[in-house]
Structure formats: C-alpha cells, structure tokens
Image (spheres, helix red, strand yellow):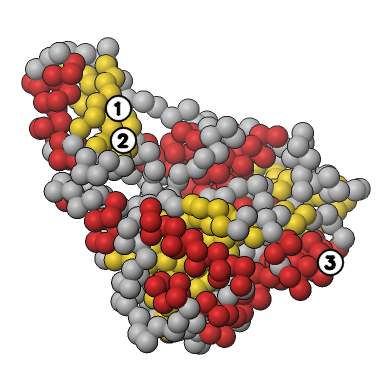
C-alpha cells in the first residue's frame, strides 16, 4: 500500500531529491533507504510572507516490497470510421476536446479549420515575427490548436464546477505534455511543447477515424428542414453531419458578422481591453520572492493583480514569466499583442496583460451598432494601435511610469517583442475610460508590489483579445442555439470559456449533451 503525505518545505529542500526524501521519511516514520519510489502529486509555492518562501507538497511513497501500480487513463477511443458524423468548426481546445468526447460516445468528428496545421502554422508565425508579413488565415490566433497553441499553454482555470479538469490534464499528458502539469497548482505546458502535443492529438483522432480539413474558412451554415446540418466554406466546399459544434474562437469576427447578416441571434457581453506590461524577470523575482536567498531554487516568479477602479475591474491576465510578447493581429489594419512562455520560462522578461472591464455602455459612439458595438469598439482600438505603431507589426510602446504621468517616453527599455516597438503616447490615444483606469490601477498595483511601477517596465499595445465582446446564445438545457437546432456553440468564441482548460471542458460538455 502506498502512503500519501503532505509536507511544507523550503525551495531548496523541494529541489534536492536527497533532502526531500529525508524529510518525507521522517514524516512517514521510516528510513530514507526504505522508500522504493517517491512521487510528487501536488505542488504549490507560497511567497506571501516576506523572506519565508515555502513549497507545499503532497507526495506518495512506496516502500520496498510493496506493489507499485501505475495509474492508467480511462479513455476509450474506438474506431468510429463508420459512425454518424458531427461537423466541428474550429480545431482549438474546444473543438479538439469535443472531438475526443464524441469518439468516446460513438460519433465520427469532422474538424474544419480555417488555418493551417500546426507545422505549417509555425513557419507563418516565424515569418510574422521577422516582419516578413502577416498571413490573415495562419497566425497566432488562427490555425490548428487555436490561439492557445502559441500563447503559452497555461492550464489554470477557476471553472472547477463545470467539468473534470483532471481528465483534461490527463489527455494533454497522454499526448506528450510533461508530468508537471499533473502536479503543479498552476500547470503550464509551454509554447515550444504544445505544437507536438496538438499534432499527437490530431493523430489519435485520425487513427480513430476522424477527419481534419485545413484552409477551410466557415462562411455560412447549412440548414435543412429547420435544423443545422453542416457548414459551407470559402472554398465552396460543404461539410454535412448530424449536427455542428461551433468552436471558432473569438478572433473570428467574420463569424459574428455572418450571424448578424443572416439575422441569427447574438448577445452583447462585457469584455476586456488593455495593454501588455513587461518587466525584467529579475525585478519580478525580487519583488515576489523578497530577494530570498533560495530564489535560485524557485521558478520564474508570476503575479496576479486586480483592483476596482471607477466601477470597473482592472486585472492581470495571461501572466507569462520568463516569456515573450508576440504579435497576435489577424489583419494588417490592426495591431494586437499577446504573451507566451516556453516550457522553461527562461527569458529575461516577464509580461502580463493588464486589462479593463468594458461594457456596452462604455463603447460610446459605437453603441449605435447594437449587438456588435463591442466588436466595432475593439476593431477601432486595434486600428488606432496600428496607426500609432509602424508597418510589419511594429507595436506602440511607452515606459509604464511615463504612461502614468502622461508624458511621451524619450526612449524605451529592452523588450522581448521581436517585430520591434516604437515610442507612442498610449495615454493620449487609448479611450479615456481605459487609459485613466489603467493609470490609477498601476498606482494601486505598485502599492501591492513595490517596484511594479518602474522606469524599467514598459507597456505595449494593445491587449484586446482576452475575451469576446459577443456571445452566441445557447439553450441551458440542450446547449443548442435557440434559433438554430443542431448548432452547438461552445468555447471562447461563443462566450462560454476563457482559456485553454475552460474551453476544453466546454467542448467536452457540449459533445456530451449532443
């Protein structure tokens, strides 16, 4: 029989196997030599007390002579080649996990993706980062794996009541993610590992009889006898099945336009807009770890910040320790940035989106567009960012302290953003309700993390794709669009998730209901 033990140790003790084994043995009442196997089941770091960083661990030990049973995954992927077909529009986490659940339930998923497969997509992204042009259908947002494939791979979610998070993590692990994602309180795959994981997931789906069709942009729904039975694409192809899972992601503005043009129900919703803030990682480490002498044994430090400013939430989003800022535009006329980290989180920079809650009533003159007001507002700000940057995705930037003081930066600190940055007065051209709240929030955040408001940090604009301004409604009981039976909206693009894990869970739930 194995034994599970919870312990609190120093970062050094957690990092050195011999030291950890000695502490665990003392807690278990045995000698270190009696332990045949020690597995870490759960790991989290507590750096709240100045100078007293602690690591909380749940470990499982097996003593010599005890049977060691390797845990198995409860996934049943049968051959569904001759089973009823379901069309899935979008091969991001919602679409992929819907496909896996459909296979388990005896349906054949047919995945339709506007972008390229993850390998070809990597080449287009490399060209983009070198300033050699943006492919509007193959970039950081569009393509196999969705926006999350090249945006870090953080798997933390607060949506714990919506589904089985552990099962999602296990499926990623089964396809090549590291053991750490099953252990860490804030699991992370890494943008360098995720493409391999996604390719492996595709191979499993295809081996089970599923299909993938790339370079197929959804342009319309096929409706027969009052029910959605397929989709039409820009190439003139038509894909039909028993039903359609709509998992197109929230950067696919043309999907909302198609719904609005055809008179299909849409709903406006609150969303968030802001900027990327970048600091030297060493500075964030010193703030968060209080210059702990054991910082060398700790991972690159992260942070989570939130405040209420003038009745709106201002908060950090997609914090990337040891990461990069990346160009996330989907059209040459707009400038968008996002963040990512590799598995090692080893760069000299830490970046995070800092965004302001935005409601329809905050969109000003764009309220005249009704249900699309938030989308038009977002597009307008992305256009302003492009006008204040330079061609080839060179982004507007400003020292954080200068932004707060309302002055132009004479020069800029080093930045991880590969296409390059140019000094710009973001405080003057961002909408006042966003700019003003960010300025006040940065002051609050500096009181919480002394040194956050630093001349070494800069903001890069704009962070506009943290959430969708439009929801595609669905019935609570059936998960189908109330006006379009047979259509199952899901994931971030439909307004029901916010991140890789919650999108994956929503895809599973929709497939189960279907």
Q: How far apart are labels 3 and 2 at the CA level? A: 50 Å
Instruction: Work out whether residue 287 or residue 125 is closer to the camera in this orientation and state it.
Output: 287
Q: Position of residue 489 (x, y in %)?
A: 71, 48
Per the image, label 2 sits on a secondary structure element best described as strand
What number is the disc on residue 43? 2
Q: Position of residue 164 (x, y in %)?
A: 53, 32
Number of other residues with Cα within 10 Å of mark 2, as a class: few under 14, some 14 to 19, many 20 or more:
some
Instruction: Work out whether residue 372 or residue 237 is closer to the camera in this orientation and state it.
Output: 372
What number is the disc on residue 457? none
Q: How far apart are labels 1 and 3 at the CA level? A: 54 Å
Per the image, label 3 sits on a secondary structure element best described as helix
Per the image, label 1 sits on a secondary structure element best described as strand
Quadrant where the C terminus sits is top right
Residue at 14 percent of width and 48 percent of height: 293
Instruction: Work out whether residue 288 or residue 350 is closer to the camera in this orientation and state it.
Output: 288
What number is the disc on residue 261? 3
Quadrant where the N terminus sits is top left
Residue at 27 percent of width and 41 percent of height: 49
In this view of the protein, can residue 312 be seen by the observer? yes
Q: How far apart are labels 2 and 1 at the CA level? A: 7 Å
């Amino acid at each position: 029989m194995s034994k599970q033990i919870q312990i609190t140790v120093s970062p050094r003790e957690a990092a050195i196997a011999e030291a950890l084994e000695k502490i665990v043995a003392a807690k278990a009442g045995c000698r270190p030599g009696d332990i045949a196997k020690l597995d870490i089941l759960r790991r989290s770091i507590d750096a709240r007390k100045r100078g007293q960083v602690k690591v909380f661990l749940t470990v499982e030990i097996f003593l010599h002579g005890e049977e060691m049973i390797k845990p198995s995954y409860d996934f049943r992927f049968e051959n569904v080649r001759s089973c009823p077909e379901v069309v899935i529009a979008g091969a991001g986490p919602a679409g992929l996990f819907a496909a896996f659940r459909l296979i388990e339930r005896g349906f054949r998923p047919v995945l339709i993706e506007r972008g390229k497969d993850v390998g070809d997509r990597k080449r287009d992204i490399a060209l983009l980062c070198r300033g050699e042009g943006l492919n509007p259908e193959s970039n950081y947002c569009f393509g196999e794996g969705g926006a999350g494939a090249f945006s870090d791979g953080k798997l933390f979610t607060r949506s714990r009541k919506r589904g089985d998070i552990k099962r999602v993590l296990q499926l990623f692990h089964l396809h090549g993610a590291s053991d750490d994602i099953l252990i860490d309180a804030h699991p992370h795959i890494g943008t360098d590992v995720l493409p391999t994981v996604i390719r492996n997931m595709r191979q499993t789906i295809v081996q089970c009889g599923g299909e993938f069709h790339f370079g197929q942009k959804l342009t319309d729904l096929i409706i027969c006898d009052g029910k959605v039975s397929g989709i039409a694409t820009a190439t003139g192809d038509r894909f039909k099945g028993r039903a359609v899972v709509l998992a197109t992601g929230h950067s696919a503005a043309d999907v909302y336009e198609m719904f609005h043009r055809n008179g299909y129900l849409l709903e406006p919703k609150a969303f968030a807009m802001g900027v990327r803030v970048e600091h030297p990682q060493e500075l964030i480490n010193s703030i968060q770890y209080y210059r702990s002498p054991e910082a060398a044994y700790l991972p690159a430090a992260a942070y989570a910040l939130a405040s209420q400013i003038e009745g709106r939430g201002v908060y950090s989003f997609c914090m990337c320790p040891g990461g990069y800022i990346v160009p996330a535009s989907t059209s040459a006329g707009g400038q968008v940035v996002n963040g990512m980290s590799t598995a090692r989180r080893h760069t000299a920079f830490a970046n995070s989106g800092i965004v302001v809650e935005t409601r329809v009533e905050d969109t000003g003159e764009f309220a005249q567009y009704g249900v699309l007001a938030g989308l038009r507002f977002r597009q307008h700000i992305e256009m302003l960012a492009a006008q204040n940057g330079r061609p080839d995705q060179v982004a507007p930037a400003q020292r954080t302290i200068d932004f707060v003081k309302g002055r132009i930066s004479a020069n800029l600190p080093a930045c991880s953003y590969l296409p390059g940055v140019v000094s710009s007065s973001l405080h003057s051209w961002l909408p006042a309700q966003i700019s003003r709240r960010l300025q006040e929030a940065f002051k609050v955040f500096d009181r919480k993390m002394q040194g956050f408001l630093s001349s070494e940090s800069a903001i890069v604009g704009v962070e506009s794709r943290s959430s969708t301004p439009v929801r595609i409604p669905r019935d609570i009981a059936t998960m189908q669009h109330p006006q379009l039976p047979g259509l199952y909206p899901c994931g971030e693009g439909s307004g029901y998730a916010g991140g890789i894990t919650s999108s994956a869970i929503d895809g599973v739930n929709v497939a189960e209901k279907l």
